[in-house]
């Protein structure tokens, strides 16, 4: 993923309009040409590794519950609740380590039997190798909970992302 490359395979309109990289032509005709040429474009596998910090309670929270049905309070899996997040991404698990971007999106508790989340988000890289690039959730992500405190609802999740994208 080059600094000034267009966003990846399943880019979103919002992502595209936010991309201010000088190398990207956002004129609708230019975008159409780019889209038409995509089937012939070369693809590349990029691996990304970072840590995601979600804080639902207390000071400086990074995510907020925005909706839930009246049955959620009786659900052991929080079924039905919907959250919006704007979480920092760091190189290391420590919250004080280098911030390389943010993940901005929505997650919802969608399982009645176990805690299961459906997430849709944009990764916005603001520093490091991928600075200026944005990535809508796609490819394959493997995640590991590095830290979770159920009282404060602070979670630190390690992400390994593998994405196919056009170069
Ligand atoms: C939830 O709301 C519905 C519709 O108002 C009501 O019929 C139901 O009794 C409520 N359930 C609970 C658990 O409060």
Image: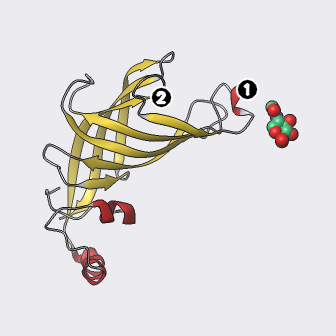
- Residue 165 pos. (x, y %): 25, 60
- Decide: is 158 above or below 12: above
Mark 2 burial class by Cα count in 10 Å: few <14, some 14-19, many 20+: some
Marked residue nearer the N-terminal end (1 or 2): 2
- Residue 138 pos. (x, y %): 37, 53
Q: CA distance from mark 1 to mark 2?
A: 20 Å
What secondary structure is found at the residue carrying circle 2?
loop
Task: Give the foreground label among 1 and 2.
Answer: 2
Residue 54 appears in the picture as rendered: yes
- The residue shown at (17%, 49%) is 130
- Decide: is 42 above or below 128: below
Mark 1 burial class by Cα count in 10 Å: few <14, some 14-19, many 20+: few
Is the CB of the residue bearing disc 2 within 8 angstroms of ligand 1? no
Disc 2 target residue:
56
Residue 12 appears in the picture as rendered: no
Image quarter in which the N terminus is found: bottom left
- The residue shown at (25%, 73%) is 26
Disc 1 target residue:
74
- Ligand 1 lies in quarter: top right
Judge by depth and name the residue closer to the eye, 31 or 58: 58
- Residue 82 pos. (x, y %): 58, 41
Number of marks present in the image shown: 2
- Decide: is 102 above or below 154: below
Q: Quadrant of residue 31?
A: bottom left
Q: Residue furthest front?
A: 59
- The residue shown at (46%, 35%) is 63
Image quarter in which the C terminus is found: bottom left
What secondary structure is found at the residue carrying circle 1?
helix
Is the CB of the residue bearing disc 1 within 8 angstroms of ligand 1? yes
- The residue shown at (46%, 22%) is 58
């Amino acid at each position: 993923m080059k600094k000034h490359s267009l966003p990846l395979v399943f880019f979103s309109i919002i992502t595209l309009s936010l991309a201010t990289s000088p190398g990207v032509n956002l004129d609708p005709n230019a975008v159409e040409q780019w889209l038409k040429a995509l089937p012939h474009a070369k693809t590349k596998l990029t691996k990304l590794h970072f840590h995601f910090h979600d804080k639902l309670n207390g000071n400086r929270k990074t995510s907020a519950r925005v909706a839930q049905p009246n049955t959620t309070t009786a659900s052991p899996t929080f079924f039905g609740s919907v959250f919006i997040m704007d979480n920092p991404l760091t190189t290391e698990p420590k919250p004080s380590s280098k911030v390389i971007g943010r993940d901005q999106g929505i997650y919802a508790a969608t399982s009645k039997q176990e805690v299961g989340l459906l997430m849709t988000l944009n990764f916005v890289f603001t520093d490091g190798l991928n600075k200026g690039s944005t990535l809508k959730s796609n490819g394959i992500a493997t995640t590991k909970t590095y830290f979770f405190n159920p009282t404060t609802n602070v979670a630190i999740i390690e992400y390994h992302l593998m994405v196919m994208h056009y170069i």
